Amino acid sequence: MYILLKDLKKYLNKTVTIKGWVFNFRSSGSIYFLQFRDGSGEIQIIVSKKEVDKNSWAACQSLTVESSLEITGKIYLEERSPHGYEMQTQKIKIISLAEEYPIGKKDHGVDFLMDHRYLWIRSRKQAAILKIRDEIIFSIRLFFKNQGFTLTDAPILTPTSCEGTTALFAIKYFDKKAYLSQSGQLYLESLIYSLGKVYDFGPTFRAEKSKTRRHLTEFWMMDAEAAFVEHQENMEIQEKLITFIINSVLKNRKKELKILDRNTSLLKKIKPPFPKITYDQAIKKLQEKGIKIKWGDDFGGDEETILSQMFDRPLFIEKYPAKIKAFYMKSDPKNAKLVLNNDCLAPEGYGEIIGGSQRVDDLKTLENKIKKFKLPRQPLEWYLDLRRYGSVPHSGFGIGLERTIAWICGLNHIRETIPFPRLINRINP
Ligand code: 4AD
Ligand code: MG
C-alpha cells in the first residue's frame, strides 16, 4: 500500500510503499542509510544487502542525492532516529536517477542560491518556511471567517494608484495604460456597502527602488475593511489578528520552528494589549537616542528597527502627519495636521508589518485631499461616489504577508519568505 510519510504512525510494523527523494545517504559496506522525504515528512531508510533482491541492492549502489525512489518496507519505531521512525527495506526502485546535484553541503553564496531557487526550496529550512507561510495564510483566513468578514477579491489590473504614484508598475492595456495593484483597499471600501466587513488576499506590486531586507516588488497583502469601525477598534482587530496568527503557528508548526531554530519564548510573549505610542512620541524617542530626525519626516527602515527593538511586543504608532500619509486617511478631529492612522511594527527590529487607518468619509474633504495630493480626479470618480451614496465611518488595514513571515520565522531577509522572490535586481527564475 502506498502511503504518505505524515501518516507513518498508523502503519507501525506494517509493510508499506513510499515515494519521494533521497536527500542524503551513507553506507557501511553491507548497509545503506538513506535520508528520505516525500514532501509530507521524512524518515531514515535502512537497506541491508542480505534482505533485498539484487536489483534493489544495485539501485542503492548507483544512488545519487535527490534521486526519486519508490521504496517498500516495514515501518518501526526507533527512538534514536531523528524522525522517531525507520523503515527496513524490502525493495527499492529508482524512479529517476538525479544528475550531480548543484547544491551541496558547503556554503553557497546568496546569488548562487537565488539563481537555483527552484532547487533551493527543497532544503529542509526553506520547506519549513513555506509550511509556516501556509499556516499564516490559513490562520488569517480563519480569523476573519470567525470574525464575520467576507473574503472577496480586488482586481490586480487597475486604472489608478492606491498608495501614491511613485511606486507604480505601469503596463500597456490594449491602447490604454494600466497599473498593477498596490493594494486592494479602494475596492474593498466599496464592498463594505454590500458586505459590511470584508477582506482580500492577493499579490500586490510596488516598483520601489529599495534594495533592503524588507522590500519585495511583488508581495502578498491581506487588506481588511469594515463599516462602522473607527480608529481605536481598527487597532484592536489588528492586535487580535496578530495574536491569533502567532498562536496558530506556535501550536501547529512546532517542528518547523525548531528546524529554523526560532526562539519561541519571544513569540510566546505576544499577547494583547500591544504598546501604543503616537508619531510625536516616536519622534521624541528617536531624538533621545541621538537619531537625526525631525517632526514631519517619515521613518525609514533604520528608525523602525530602533523603535521596534524598544518593546517585546508589536508596537502601534498612531497619528502620523497627514502630509506623509495617503490621501484617503481621515484627519484627527483634535489636530487637523494628523491622521487617524496606525502602523504596526513587529518586535526584534523587524519593523512595519501593518499599515491601517480610518478613511475619509465625507465628499468635500475627500475632493479637497485629492486636489491637495495632486492626484488625477477622473479615475477616482467612482471612489468619490462612495461618499455620495450612504457613506459611513469605516476603517481598514493591510498586513504584509512576507514581512510577517520573516518576523515569525526569525529570518534576516525577506527573500526566503516567498517561493520565487521578485526584487529590484531579480526576476529570475
Ligand atoms: O502600509 P501599506 O502601504 O498600506 C497599504 O497599502 C494600505 N492600502 C493597506 C490598507 O489599509 N488596506 O502596506 C501594507 C503592508 C505594509 O505594512 C508591509 O507589511 C507590506 O504591506 N509592504 C511590503 N511588503 C514587502 N515588500 C514591500 N515592498 C512592501 N510594501 C508594503
Ligand atoms: Mg505603510
Image (tube, rainbow, N blue to C red):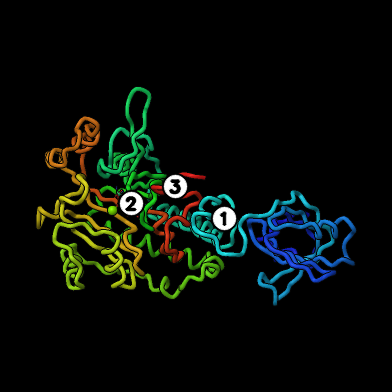
- The residue wearing badge 3 is 426
Foreground pick, 373 / 167: 167
Residue 428 at x, y percent in the picture: 49, 45
Q: Amino acid at mark 2?
A: Ser
- Crowding at dot 1, Cα within 10 Å, few <14 / some 14-19 / many 20+, comes out as some
Quarter of the rendering containing residue 346? bottom left
User: SS at mark 2?
Assistant: loop
Q: Earlier in the sequence, mark 1 or mark 3?
A: 1
Q: Is residue 36 visible?
A: yes
| Circle 1 residue | 120
Q: CA distance from mark 1 to mark 3?
A: 16 Å
Q: What is the three-letter code of the residue carrying label 3?
A: Arg
Dot placed on the residue nearer the N-terminal end, 3 or 2:
2
Q: Does the rendering let one see residue 393?
A: no
Q: Does mark 2 have its CB less than 8 Å from ligand 1?
A: yes
* Nearer to me, 237 or 409: 409
Quick check: marks 2 and 1 in contact, CB under 8 Å?
no
Q: Position of residue 310 (x, y in %)?
A: 28, 73
Of 196 and 414, nearer the camera is: 414
Q: Secondary structure at mark 3?
A: loop
Disc 1 on helix, strand or loop? helix
Within the image, what quadrant is residue 321 found in? bottom left
What residue is rendered at 28% in x and 35% in y?
160
Disc nearer the start of the sequence (2/1): 1
Image location of residue 207, percent across then percent down: 34, 44
Residue at 38 percent across and 49 percent down: it is 221
Query: Where residue 34 is drawn, which disc sits there?
Result: none
Q: Amino acid at mark 1?
A: Trp
Where 390 sits versus 210, above or below?
A: above
Measure how far apart labels 2 and 1 are at the Cα level: 24 Å
